[in-house]
Image: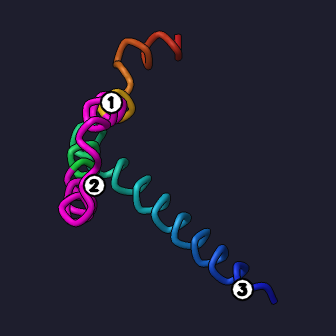
């Protein structure tokens, strides 16, 4: 058996559990609280890494701009107009 096979199966299982938990949390908390919880968990997860290995200063503005663009929830008007 290849070395990568158990690792990839484990990664797939972790992804499936994470997806299930996020769907349950989104259903229970609602969109607003879910995004807040997601932002908190992300902050707690990545802050220690950023303290240990900070990004190069010239790349920081581009990283911040792209992450803020990607992390925005969809607009309410888009959801309403899509289902009409």
Q: Quadrant of residue 35?
A: top left
Within 10 Å of disc 3 (Cα), the crowding (few <14, some 14-19, many 20+) is: few
Give above or below for 7 relative to 26: below
Residue in front for this viewpoint, 58 or 21:
58
Q: Nearer the viewer, mark 2 or mark 1?
A: 1
The x, y position of residue 11, in whole percent, is 57, 71
> Mark 3 vs mark 1: which is more N-terminal?
3
The x, y position of residue 26, in whole percent, is 35, 48
Q: Determine if the magenta segment contains residue 44.
A: yes
The x, y position of residue 18, in whole percent, is 45, 63
> Mark 3 vs mark 2: which is more N-terminal?
3
* In-image side of 33 versus 79 (left or right): left
Q: Which residues are magenta?
A: 40-67
Mark 1 lies on a secondary structure that is: helix
Report if the CB atoms under discs 3 and 1 are less than 8 Å apart.
Answer: no
Q: Residue furthest right?
A: 1
The x, y position of residue 53, in whole percent, is 27, 61
Report if the CB atoms under discs 2 and 1 are less than 8 Å apart.
Answer: no
Q: Nearer the viewer, mark 3 or mark 1?
A: 1
- Find disc 3 in the rendering and name its residue: 3
- Find disc 1 in the rendering and name its residue: 62
* In-image side of 43 versus 72 (left or right): left
Find the distance from the CA under tag 3 to the CA under tag 1.
37 Å
Residue positioned 49% across, 68% down in the render: 17
Q: Nearer the viewer, mark 3 or mark 2?
A: 3
Within 10 Å of disc 2 (Cα), the crowding (few <14, some 14-19, many 20+) is: few
Q: Quadrant of residue 8?
A: bottom right
Residue positioned 30% across, 28% down in the render: 65
- Find disc 2 in the rendering and name its residue: 42
Q: Determine if the magenta segment contains residue 55.
A: yes
Find the distance from the CA under tag 2 to the CA under tag 1.
19 Å
């Amino acid at each position: 058996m290849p070395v990568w096979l158990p690792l990839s199966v484990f990664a797939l299982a972790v992804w499936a559990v994470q997806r299930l938990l996020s769907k349950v949390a989104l259903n229970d908390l609602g969109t607003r609280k879910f995004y807040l919880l997601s932002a908190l968990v992300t902050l707690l997860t990545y802050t220690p890494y950023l303290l240990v290995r900070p990004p190069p200063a010239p790349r920081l503005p581009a990283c911040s701009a792209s992450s803020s663009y990607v992390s925005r929830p969809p607009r309410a008007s888009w959801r309403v107009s899509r289902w009409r």
